[in-house]
Image (cartoon, rainbow, N blue to C red):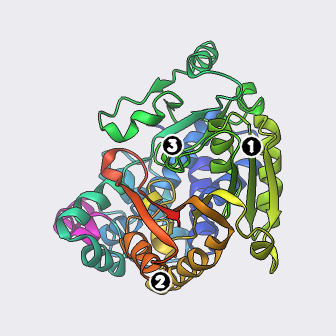
Amino acid sequence: MKFHRNLVQTVIETLQQIFISGLYADRAIEQVLKQNPRFGSRDRRFIAETTYEIVRWMRYISLCVSEEHGTSKSHYYKLFAAWHHLKGIELPDWKEFDGIHKNEISKKAAQIKLIRKYRESIPDWLDEIGIAELGEAVWEKEIHELNKEAQVVLRVNTLKISAEELRNKLSEQGIEAETLSNPSPVWGEIKGAALIVKRQNLYHLKEYKQGLFEIQDASSQLIAPFLQLKEGMTVIDACAGAGGKSLHIAALMKNKGRIISMDVEERKLIELKKRAERAGAGMIQTQLINSDTINKLKNTADRLLLDVPCSGLGVIRRNPDAKWKLSLDFINKVKKTQQEIICTYHQMLKPGGIMVYATCSILPGENQNQAELFLNKNKNIFEFIKERKVMPSEGFDGFYMAAFRKL
């Protein structure tokens, strides 16, 4: 493998943006690639993949060079060198790599692999909460899975095209899209509209610009069907963000009915409007949440989706820097927010309607414990229908969803 100095330097600068300036990895990588439009596809892939790898394995690599903390460029060059040595890749004879002792790195790696929090490259507190909430055997399995690279999954926009037609269109451009091959029955209901492709830039494709597909993980695609939708319903997506699940709901309802997509951030709703127009999802209306919103929409929804803010531990495969930016304090705060949302927003649901509480976390404290707490507070108003826990070891992101019926 041949290293190019300008590309390595770009990786180093991107790592500094993530760990010193505090940018999220996806934003830092997007920013640096926009600033360097001359980079070819192979160069862009090297920068993105190398940055994500070092971010994911930051603690493990740092311990291999006996430097768990550092801010200088020389520190990040050491991490770059150690990571590639551990992968068996020969380094060029650059002054930036002086002082790299390969034997010491290999010896240290053999020692720290015996300790899970080092081997899986996670903070102490995360290892502790994982064991406490899931048990050691389950946590061991799931955190190992969360350190694997996430697959790229498309959701076919069935308002405009079938999965087979989209596969053919992509194949004409040399992009092979495969249906889900995971044998678990949990994926059966989405196999007709979920396709897996190799990691690459898909946003420039005319098929994307025409709204023929969205990029959405398979686990996330399970949430809309969980609502038990029917054409003509009024559905409120109360924590809609940029609207991935709202778009899926529109497709399942064949654009018949009404979706009110709500959020507290206007910029996300602006993006949602663009995506809805591209997808041909005319049934979607956006609503910025204010002090009167819930009261005005009382008893109006046949279905209510609460995809609440959470730790995001189920999706750290695709957001590995979250491991270093999360804290136990944040998780405790977000659990309070979750309970506030579910105990307030449920008022928008009609009697007989179904509400789904969902997170992209794998921690029971954010999931079934929250569902039980809500039900205990509202026994005379709601009944529990069912829940679904999707773990990373099942092949995709970790998600939780619980359905309740309003009496």
Stretch of the chain drawn in magenta: 102-120
Residue closer to the observer: 211 or 26: 211
How far separated are the C-alphas under marks 1 and 3? 55 Å
Under mark 2, the amino acid is Lys
Residue closer to the observer: 249 or 28: 249
Secondary structure under tag 3 reads: loop
Q: Where 221 sits versus 271, above or below?
A: above
Under mark 3, the amino acid is Phe
How far separated are the C-alphas under marks 2 and 1? 32 Å
Q: Which residue is mark 3?
A: 3
**In percent of the image, x 67 and y 64: which residue is there?**
238
The x, y position of residue 169, in whole percent, is 64, 16
Q: Residues within 10 Å of mark 2 (few under 14, many from 20)?
A: few
Q: Which residue is mark 2?
A: 377
Residue 24 visible: yes
The x, y position of residue 391, in whole percent, is 34, 54
Which of disc 1 and disc 2 is earlier in sequence?
Answer: 1
How far separated are the C-alphas under marks 3 and 2? 60 Å
